[in-house]
């Protein structure tokens, strides 16, 4: 038989459990964010690119169009074009865009076919700070060409 000690026992409700779970998730997520700067470097970007393409790349054939100054790093327009005839025997298979100063260097990959007629892609990307953007073109014969351009990311157009 239980003895009545006058203490009230509190039963956890659904909301209390959800609050506790939410706090736990935030603590885990915050711990990951506070673990230090995890931005890519030129070296780690080159290593990541080498893992993707599996071979050495040569400079040339790739043209990157970026604004010199991006006033809004959340949406930076980029166009990458590659000098290629885009015929069934000689075409660009893949265009890879990498950013040397983002947390993850790989931005996007595009797979192309000769049916496109032109080796050019355009998109927008997010850049965390002033950095180099690297584009690589994997050709149908397995050769790889790269191009690089720096973009200065400012805050509100005030420099930085």
Image (cartoon, grey):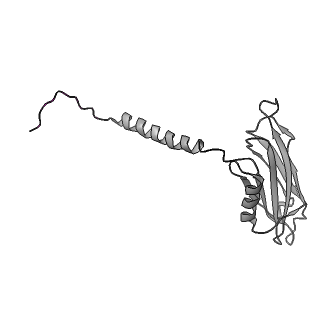
Where residue 4 appears, x then y in whole percent?
13, 31
Q: Main secondary structure of the magenta part?
A: loop
Where residue 134 appears, x then y in whole percent?
81, 54
Where residue 98 appears, x then y in whole percent?
76, 53
When the figure is inspected, residue 9 is found, relative to residue 61, above or below; the finding is above
Q: Quadrant of residue 145?
A: bottom right
Q: Quadrant of residue 29?
A: top right
Residue at far front of view: 36
Residues 51 and 80: in front is 51
In screen coordinates, is 81 left or right of 129? right
Question: Is 19 one of the magenta-colored residues?
Answer: no
Residue at far left of view: 1
Residue under the point 72% across and 59% down:
48
Residues 125 and 68: in front is 68
Question: Is 6 one of the magenta-colored residues?
Answer: yes
Highlighted range, magenta: 2-11
When the figure is inspected, residue 73 is found, relative to residue 156, above or below; the finding is below
Residue at far top of view: 6
Residue under the point 43% across and 40% down:
21
Quadrant location, the C terminus? top right
When the figure is inspected, residue 28 is found, relative to residue 47, above or below; the finding is above
Residue under the point 86% across and 41% down:
67
Q: Quadrant of residue 50?
A: bottom right
Residue under the point 59% across and 42% down:
33
């Amino acid at each position: 038989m239980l003895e009545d000690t006058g203490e009230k026992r509190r039963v956890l409700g659904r909301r209390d459990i959800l609050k506790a779970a939410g706090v736990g998730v935030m603590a885990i997520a915050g711990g990951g964010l506070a673990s230090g700067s995890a931005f890519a470097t030129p070296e780690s970007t080159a290593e990541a690119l080498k893992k993707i393409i599996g071979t050495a790349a040569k400079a040339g054939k790739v043209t990157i169009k970026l604004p010199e100054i991006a006033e809004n790093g959340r949406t930076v327009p980029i166009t990458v074009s590659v000098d290629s005839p885009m015929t069934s025997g000689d075409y660009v298979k893949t265009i890879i865009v990498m950013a040397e100063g983002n947390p993850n260097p790989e931005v996007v990959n595009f797979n192309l076919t000769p049916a496109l007629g032109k080796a050019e892609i355009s998109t927008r990307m997010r850049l965390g700070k002033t950095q180099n953007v690297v584009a690589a073109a994997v050709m149908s014969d397995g050769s790889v060409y790269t191009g690089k351009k720096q973009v200065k990311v400012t805050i509100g157009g005030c420099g930085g």
